[in-house]
Amino acid sequence: MARQGSFFLKSLVLFLGFVGFVPFGAKAAVKKYQFDIQVKNVSRLCHAKPIVTVNGMFPGPTIYAREGDRVLVNVTNYAEYNMSIHWHGLKQFRNGWADGPAYVTQCPITRGQSYSYGFNITGQRGTLWWHAHILWLRATVYGAIVILPKQGTPFPFPQPDQEANIILGEWWNTDVEQVINQANKLGIPPNMSDAHTINGKPGPLFPCSEKHTFAMEVEWGKTYLLRIINAALNDELFFAIAGHNMTVVEIDAVYSKPFSTQALLIAPGQTTNVLVQANQNPGRYFIAARPFIDVPIPADNKTAIAILQYKGIPNTVMPILPQLPSPNNTEFVMSYNDKLRSLNTPQFPAKVPLNVDRHLFYTIGLGRNPCPTCVNGTQFTASLNNITFVMPQIGLLQAHYFNIKGVFRTDFPDRPLKSFNYTGAPLTANLGTSLGTRLNRVAFNSTVELVLQDTNLLTIESHPFHLHGYNFFIVGRGIGNFDPAKDPAKFNLVDPPERNTAGVPTGGWTAIRFTADNPGVWFLHCHLEVHTTWGLKTAFVVEDGKGPNQSILPPPKDLPPC
Ligand code: C2O
């Protein structure tokens, strides 16, 4: 308590996190950024350690652009780790070369080398983010992408007075690469993070918090647009602001039907834009983020805290704590997810595929494989349709584009070879998981429905799945086993949420639909980094179309060699 007392009495350095609207010109422009990957000593929780950063910043710089702009980010790697950067949620039409996942669309940028990511922002506006897409480096290498609507195009909701980015993350006191390498060697799950963070800062529930609390000042009567991003590696998070309701207006850079809520759930990879009105008793209010976990695995209940402070209120006023849903509140999560709907107006229609060309059904499995050198004689593994994905040595997109044989196969099965009671009693037996770099081939412009089914192999758990190169519609969701005879009748084909990352509920399923109109090789993976590491990933090869603008663009000259 002494620690907290001293915290409240000390005057906090207020970091003003708001930016006004960036006064861009009316015409589409080229926005240029230089990202220097460099190691910097950063201290949190009374520990200092070298971390990999962009331009020495943690979180990294925000990319600002408008819909229709071209963005050029030249990345120069001065760090000892190989690097690649992913622009999470940008569709990269015909342009997988700029997508970024290492060994999927490019080989890494090695030390001393540069690569320039160039992409157009077409038909998208809202909040996205960028992060390292190699090893576990995204633990510290991440930042926001803010795409404003075209000049003169208003938001489809009341114009806010100001806006701020809120990036949620995780912090380890030790080197994250050591954390995951050690865990892999021993065959056990990696150590939990030491803190959650809001804009890189853990807040007063952690030691040495004085300088490490994010605070933002608001003026009574004004409306704020908060762009919330979950950049955490392994935790879905609840988020709330004491005393203030939030109006959700956009998810994953897609406008949604507005609704008011006391708390929200955000999975790793997802973004949520909310409007907040500073209309309460002027004072100090805590902003909090804490994990949602509805399975009995070692619980991580650390709460990251920031402060919303009304102008003119002294730092000595004790802030008020928000009410977060309890960590295992599945019911809250279900009802929150049910409220997420596409805006679906003439200007922003929900173009849900109504007829399906390809029905895919992928089971999500965790497991243990024999490992004589590991602590328990086993190591953790994960699979889709019982296949644990093996990363190749060269980029899958190169192998596809240049027709290099022997890198991957396109025989990933449309459904599991053996069906079983997916969500019945715990299945500890390994169902014969195999290793492979196996992808699914999809015809250009075909409509795809993918049902992701959680299983009770080892344990049920929720999994936020991310598809590169596309947005998709979440047409259905349920608990238990997906029933192809009954469940499709309940699908929402009118205004389902459109996203790039969808949660698969614990012991349940999620059905997504998309039109495969973007040729390339597109990664599909769980955005819990620990599961991706264990092999919970695959990719789609979307073939070229016949038309003039329906094939993969030629690779840029500076594409990193392998
Ligand atoms: Cu945000 Cu493949 O990742």
Image (tube, rainbow, N blue to C red):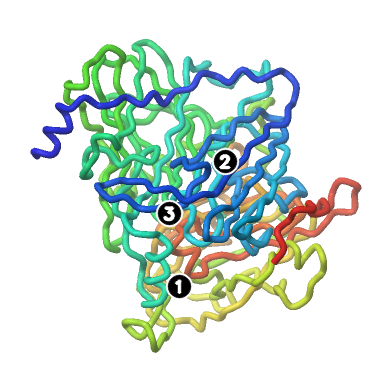
Q: Earlier in the sequence, mark 2 or mark 1?
A: 1
Classify the position of the C terminus by image quarter. Answer: bottom right
Q: Amino acid at mark 2?
A: Pro
Query: Label 3 vs label 1: CA separation?
Result: 30 Å
Q: Is residue 363 visible?
A: yes
Are circles 3 and 2 on residues that touch, CB within 8 Å? no
Q: Amino acid at mark 1?
A: Asn
Foreground pick, 403 / 327: 403
Does the Cβ of the disc 1 residue fall within 8 Å of ligand 1? Answer: no
Foreground pick, 316 / 91: 316
Q: Is residue 474 visible?
A: no
For mark 3, what is the residue? 233
Mark carried by residue 421: 1
Is residue 535 rendered to the left or right of residue 266?
right
Residue 380 image point, x, y percent: 41, 75
> Callout 1: helix, strand or loop?
loop
Query: Label 3 vs label 2: CA separation?
Result: 27 Å
Residue pictured at 37% horizontal, 79% vertical:
428
Are circles 2 and 1 on residues that touch, CB within 8 Å? no
For mark 2, what is the residue? 496
